[in-house]
Image (cartoon, coloured by chain):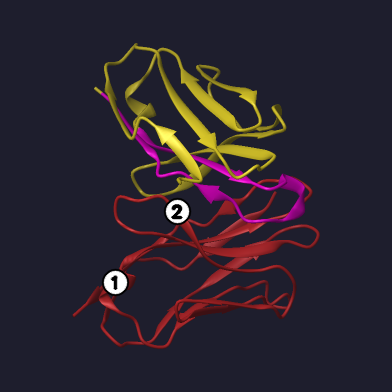
Chain colours: A red, B yellow
Amino acid sequence: GDSVTQMEGPVTLSEEAFLTINCTYTATGYPSLFWYVQYPGEGLQLLLKATKADDKGSNKGFEATYRKETTSFHLEKGSVQVSDSAVYFCAVITGANSKLTFGKGITLSVRP
Amino acid sequence: DTAVSQTPKYLVTQMGNDKSIKCEQNLGHDTMYWYKQDSKKFLKIMFSYNNKELIINETVPNRFSPKSPDKAHLNLHINSLELGDSAVYFCASSPQGNMNTEAFFGQGTRLTVV
């Protein structure tokens, strides 16, 4: 079945630092890839997505590029803010099984 | 208007009780899901319904029984609650499960079994 591997956390950064969160996946067919964010005490919100190879998803200063050759979808932001402190999940879905599969999530804390 | 709404938000109950969590979506989506998030934030799919029909049933104890009276509702009933059932349960929906589209999540129900 599909699987997603995220880098181990937690991650603590100072405000305005550069962020990279690694994500790799295994999936059959032509998956779509997502990053979700979970702020403290809240549900999951879609942050960005990419539906085919070389697509770049972007939102709120975050970016991720669908790399089929390396089966990766790394999340980046050039300058993080305290308000970005949250748990970030990489996820994959393929039409074959209609199942959105998540990575383990990584907690990001940004210090002022 | 809340797109995917779950009730209750918090649920504290004793071992052995039976409880239900309700979920409704007003997005007109065909597919609905239940996910369980454990204390380490790991999310695992439990069930998926498409137009009221069960399409995914992961390895979940049969004490958990989903019910979909119509495609806008997917409720989760849990019998004989155990301590290990304590978690946050998320309902989600997507336009059509086989279209590789994102899912929209509710705010979660934090279940605590004491």
Q: Residue A44 carries which label?
A: 2
Residue A10 seen: no
Front residue (pair B79, A82): A82
Q: What residue type is labelled 1?
A: Ser
Determine whether label 1 and label 2 are within 8 Å by CB.
no
Residue B111 in the image, given as x and y percentages of width and height: 33, 30
Q: What element carries label 1?
A: helix
Establish if A13 lies above or below A47.
Answer: below
From this viewpoint, which residue is outermost toward the front? B1
Q: In which quarter of the image is the C terminus of chain A?
A: bottom left
Residue B73 in the image, given as x and y percentages of width and height: 57, 29
Establish if A99 lies above or below B109.
Answer: below
Front residue (pair A91, A46): A46
Which chain hosts label 1?
A: A
Report the residue marked by disc 1: A83
Q: Distance between the residues labelled 1 and 2?
A: 16 Å
Q: Give the range drawn in magenta.
A: B87-113
Residue B48, image quadrant: top right
- Of the image marks 1 and 2, the number of the one nearer the N terminus: 2
Front residue (pair B14, B102): B102
Residue A30 in the image, given as x and y percentages of width and height: 78, 63
Establish if A86 lies above or below B29.
Answer: below
Establish if A86 lies above or below B13.
Answer: below
Which chain hosts label 2?
A: A
